Amino acid sequence: MKTGVRVLDIMTRKPVTVGSDATVRACAKLMLKNKVGSLIIKKDSKLLGILTEKDLVEEIVARGKNPDKIKAREIMTTKPQTIRPSADVYDAMVRMKKRRIRRLPVVENGRFIGLITDKDILRVEPQLFDLITEKYRTIGLKRKPGVEYLEGECEV
């Protein structure tokens, strides 16, 4: 179900970014200051990775590591899923749901140009949330062997 809305139209064009040498404490403070749940790790216009609040909890807090001694590059997600700016927001939402992620860096010709989040999509296309959620609930159902299932929309 294409929406006709491109990723480029709703993405954040200037997300919060940081270099890979920043300490985890500095990253956490930057996230808090800017009220964001992730930081883009980049060098010039090249995407190096993404650091999320989940990374901070799992890699630092839960393991009792010192955030002053760990660098962003040590815990960031390298090679994150990305999307093209010309992609439809429906495709972005499907990719996020499939990969169980909430953010997609937007990359064009190898250059990082923005970030799209599930909140960005739901702000512009709120009906996608129900459609995607319902679709994935249906896919997740256990099916009985030997029973034929039909999928589609009810027209009644």
Image (cartoon, helix red, strand yellow):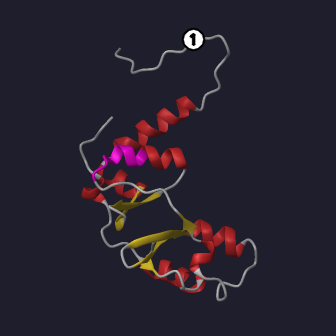
- Looking at the image, the residue that sits furthest to the bottom is 68
Badge 1 local density, few (<14 within 10 Å), some, or many (20+)?
few
Q: Is residue 61 left or right of residue 141?
A: right
Residue at 67% in and 88% down: 69
Q: How many marks?
A: 1
Viewport quadrant of the N terminus: top left
Residue at 27% in and 41% down: 3
98 or 83, nearer to the observer: 83
Q: Which residue is mark 1?
A: 148
Q: In the rendered image, is residue 148 in sight?
A: yes
Question: Which segment did they paint magenta?
Answer: 86-93
Residue 124: where, in percent of width, then height? 29, 52
- Looking at the image, the residue that sits furthest to the right is 64
Viewport quadrant of the C terminus: top left
92 or 57, nearer to the observer: 92
Q: Amino acid at mark 1?
A: Glu
Is residue 89 located in the magenta-colored stretch of the structure? yes
| Mark 1 residue element | loop
Residue 67: where, in percent of width, then height? 65, 84
Q: Which of the 4 image quarters holds residue 25?
A: bottom right
Is residue 36 located in the magenta-colored stretch of the structure? no
Residue 136: where, in percent of width, then height? 52, 36
**As drawn, 150 above or below 60:** above
Q: In the rendered image, is residue 37 in sight?
A: no
Residue at 39% in and 18% down: 154
Residue at 38% in and 44% down: 91
Residue 34: where, in percent of width, then height? 42, 78
**As drawn, 11 above or below 126:** below
Q: Which of the 4 image quarters holds residue 139?
A: top right
112 or 15, nearer to the observer: 112
**As drawn, 133 above or below 17:** above
Q: Main secondary structure of the magenta part?
A: helix
